[in-house]
Amino acid sequence: MTWMKPVIGGRAANSKRLLEELDFACDPLGPENMLIFGIGPLTGTLCPASAYYTVTARSPLTGILGDSAAGGHFAAEMKLTGFDQIIFTGALDTLSYLLITAEGVDFVECPDLTLKSITETTCAVRKQQHDPAIQVAAIGPAGENVVLFSTIVSSGNRVNGRTGMGAVMGSKKVKAIAVKGSQPVEIADPPRFLSEARALEQHIMAHPEYSKRHHMGTTMLMQDLNNIGILPTNHFQKGVCPYVENISGETLARTYKVKNKSCFNCPVHCSRYITCHEHQGEGPEFETLCSFTSRIGNEDLEYALKMSIALNQMGLDSISTGEVIGWIMECQEKGLLTPEDVDGLSVHWGDTHAISTLIEKIVNRAGIGAVLAEGAWKASERFSEKARDLVMQVKGLDIICGDPRGIKAYGLTYAISSRGADHLRAEPYFELTNRKKEALRRFGTEQAANRLAEEGKAALVTYSEKIALLCDALTMCKNIGLCMDVLHFDSAATLLTAATGISYTPQQVETSMEKCITRDHLINTRCGMTRDADTLPERFLHEPLVEGPTAGSTVDITKMVDEYYALHGWQ
Amino acid sequence: MIHVDLSRCTGCRRCETACAFFRTGRISRHLARIKVVNLYETGIDAPVVCVQCAEQYCMPCPEDALATGPLGQVIYSPTLCTLCGRCEQRCPIGAIEIIEHTVVVCDLCGGNPRCVQACTEGALTYIPQENRDSLNRYEHISKGNPPGEKRKLYASDRGESLRAQWRDSH
């Protein structure tokens, strides 16, 4: 209890464990690296959308703090096993899965599951254990082949996508974790807990974005980002996509969606099940949809849907995969890479045949795939400086789908994020909500609600990153807690106190999150990271977009990063 | 009975969680009287709960620990029950089960089922009814299986027509 209280749980607790117990001289793919699955005190409870778990390790892709969260049903089942963290150290000799049930904890050797897909693995484990209710988090062929941006996938399609956690699991020869819990969780003050959880839920269901999110989930962002000129198109060369109608969330919902899907205990049900000819599955989310359409110049929606399902089954991160492909396309367009550099492949915008060939090579580490499996940033080391400059990354992690020239707080977030280019460390969605008075009240300037301004963004990000971490510590969905602006320190303190019987004040919760953010910064310092790395690719600093509502804008990143460091009191 | 519309079920398991919390005061989905089967291989999510079947497979209980209530629901007496397991074996859809030394079965919460309240998608509806559906078809499909496996077989079978609709929608 004294160990958990100041970090609450989830990602924050994982980071603490890593800092206390990892030897930072370790090889991220060596047996000495740790792999931690963590949940928190509210996971799996009636607290809405408390469905997440975070996987943490030193990242093989970036060399710094690596972690990635996923929703679905794995976390809620893990909660009932009685374990808040599952920690792997060392490595196995034979491919095995970890089985945790009421009968105990054991490794089960499974050489027969070698190179099996996620669904094949899930079904095989359930069948072997004679229990169709077991929840499984597994790696696919990409993880087994230690592709540095491979994923862990649970509940069929719920992905721990970023920073190569699948590769760490693969390096330890752990094919899957299978959990089936039977230990009830006591709530200290059920009536109070229930009333606070219901209040939060009413807030969510009355939210103006509720029906839009229910209808399209994150795919609503295709049209939204295009409308403000920041939808990555042809590898961030444009921010407006001329064929957005063909690949939008609206089109997807109208044509291929057959029903809504949901994480555990969520009232929004924002995920979607799709059928598209012989392909069917859950998803895609916005990042995958954009990564496999406009970002790589592809207007064939059916191809993107097919790849979304395929990537989840193989265990590849769609953002980093999209960056590898987009980077090669732009480099070939500009003559910086030749077909000979890529096993004789000419890779043009939207060339689905070449894209599929590349992905197959990456998953199997065949030919140039062995190089590309290291991720775009490491792969670029063998090419020219100009080609290297075109990798859209920070700290070795590929940038998500959102052009920072038109969303400055996001730009700052990509730059300072402790796992490399990423929006989820702060998700400063507030800057897109046009709430000027609220911006003045919360962040001292109306400009915090102006997406094109740098002013006030450090204040917005230092606030948002605390709520983002709080979401991860409570294992709550950030689309709900943060984007819908429903989670605050006071409601978190009430929920935690009622659930655990341990007294939390809003101030304690906030201070805890601040300390945890500084701890993450310390982890990266131990990994050799310096302040120089807190920046963005040159393109976003010096090359304005030429068309659309974000035309003419670039990011003054130094100003924002300096303010951000000052607010934290960091050197 | 609690009517289940599979086409609307998202697999969120709010029904399960609410049921278990209301009945036990704890987070204990395994103690829920309604259980959701998530079939990732087919996309089917199916809450499985007692349908108050025409055959009343779980009855008669040799110890008279089960009775039919005024709503047609199964009423369980823990004092009379000897945990012989006959009801669990007989139910063709895995809707009655011994967990933690007690028989777990839906009793419709006395006419105000908490699972139906918890469902925001309209997948669950409470319909007081006099006609009882037959589960005869599932007796042969699931015989000899444990309750979890029976629920899966029932969910898969019921999901087939929905999957056919999905295929036809293109």
Image (cartoon, rainbow, N blue to C red):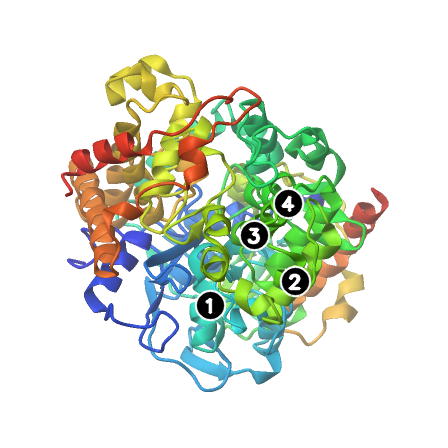
**Mark 1 vs mark 2, CA separation in Å:** 28 Å
Q: Nearer the viewer, residue A357 or B105?
A: A357
Per the image, label 4 sits on a secondary structure element best described as: helix
Looking at the picture, which amino acid does disc 4 mark?
Glu
Pointers 1 and 2 within a single chain: yes
Pointers 4 and 2 within a single chain: yes
Earlier in the chain: of badge 4 and badge 2, it is 4
Looking at the picture, which amino acid does disc 1 mark?
Ala
Q: Position of residue A199 (x, y in %)?
A: 38, 31
Looking at the picture, which amino acid does disc 3 mark?
Ser
Q: Is residue B56 in sight in this rendering?
A: no
Judge left or right: residue A251 versus residue A479. Answer: right
Mark 2 falls within which chain? Answer: A
Q: Is residue A126 in sight in this rendering?
A: yes
**Mark 3 vs mark 4, CA separation in Å:** 22 Å
Number of marks in the image?
A: 4
Tag shown at residue A318: 3
Q: Which residue is mark 2?
A: A340
Quadrant where the N terminus of chain A is found in the figure: bottom left
